[in-house]
Amino acid sequence: MADDTRPPRGVSLASLEIEIQRWLTELGHSEASWTVTRATFRRFVRFASSHGVVDVVDVDAALVQQFIDAPGVRGGSPSPATQHQRRSALRLVFRLHSKNDGSIVDPTLHLALPSREADPARPLTDIEIDLIRGASLSTLHETRLPAIVALAEASAITSEIAYITSDDVDLCTRTVRLEGSRNTRARVAQLSNWGVAQLRRRIETVDDGHLVYRTSKAKPGIAHTSVAVALGRLLTKAGLGDLPNVGTGSLRATAGRRTLDATGRIDAAAHVLGCRSLDVAARLVGWDWLEDPD
């Protein structure tokens, strides 16, 4: 007769999903954060099962590496960004579980991955922002360039900046209404003290309400390009044009980073930035959010 008194192996990978969701909720992570992690972890559970592994204690670095390197649903090798996302999701799961069970060793700990693709424009420092502000005020009468900087500081992307009118700005509440774009959600953004002052000056000088591009009838892309070129020239004039990962999106990224620093929540930063993806928001603000569950 078989001996059925052997102790259980441990926690099954399938049951761990429920526990991880509970821990993430307790730590204040949003449902969107969990959705990203769950999708990757469920794929890993199926992958592990196909390799005969169903228990947490049987997961090792070799299995995780195989999963990270596995072809996607469309075949072909995964991109470096996908590999990093897979590792980060599993790292979050195993680090949370190790806090509950100290005997668990994170199998992702020493995995080396290829470098990601080029990072997007990084957030700026306070000193760098001051340099750009100064560059925009080339003369006492200049109002368009400072207005562009003020709107970019508020998180607006160039295609949003191009069509903002005075009706979108509320100087009393220090906000600007952003209509969104193909890549961003509509939102109400907060202006800086400096930004309020510059937009007040700009509003007083325009007679058709268009703050940056004088007509709303421009061909698609022309107004957007005009704003992007203006920001690029300002970066060069401020002495920042040749710095690694500093670009026209850096001012916008700074707004998201400040929100993350103030709230500790990547979903709050994503809301400010109008990002439809938490992963995109995390990359913009320079934070590997899945690798820092606390």
Image (cartoon, helix red, strand yellow):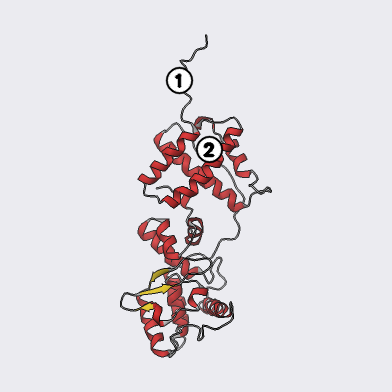
The residue where tag 1 is placed is: 7
Location of residue 198 (image quadrant): bottom left
Q: Quadrant of residue 199?
A: bottom left
Q: Are marks 2 and 1 in contact (CB under 8 Å)?
A: no
Name the residue tied to disc 2. 107
Residue displayed at 47% across by 69% down: 252
Q: CA distance from mark 2 to mark 1?
A: 23 Å
Q: Earlier in the sequence, mark 2 or mark 1?
A: 1
Q: Nearer the viewer, residue 4 or 283?
A: 4
Count neighbours of disc 1 (C-alpha within 10 A) and say few if under 14, some if 14 to 19, many if 20 or more: few
User: Which residue appears at 48% of the width and 15% of the height?
Assistant: 4
Name of the residue lying farthest toward the right:
76
Residue at x 64% of width, y 47% of height: 73
Disc on res. 118: none
Q: Secondary structure at mark 2?
A: loop
Q: Residue at x 44, y 60 (%)?
A: 270
Few, some or many residues within 10 Å of mark 2 (<14, 14–19, 20+) = many
Q: Is residue 219 above or below residue 155?
A: below
Which amino acid lies under the numbered mark 1 shown in the image of this protein? Answer: Pro
Q: Position of residue 223 (x, y in %)?
A: 55, 80
Q: Secondary structure at mark 1?
A: loop
Residue type marked 2? Pro
Q: Position of residue 152 (x, y in %)?
A: 46, 73
* Residue 109 visible: no
In the rendered view, tell whether residue 13 sits above or below residue 81. Answer: above
- Residue 138 at x, y percent in the picture: 47, 86
Residue 255 seen from this side: yes
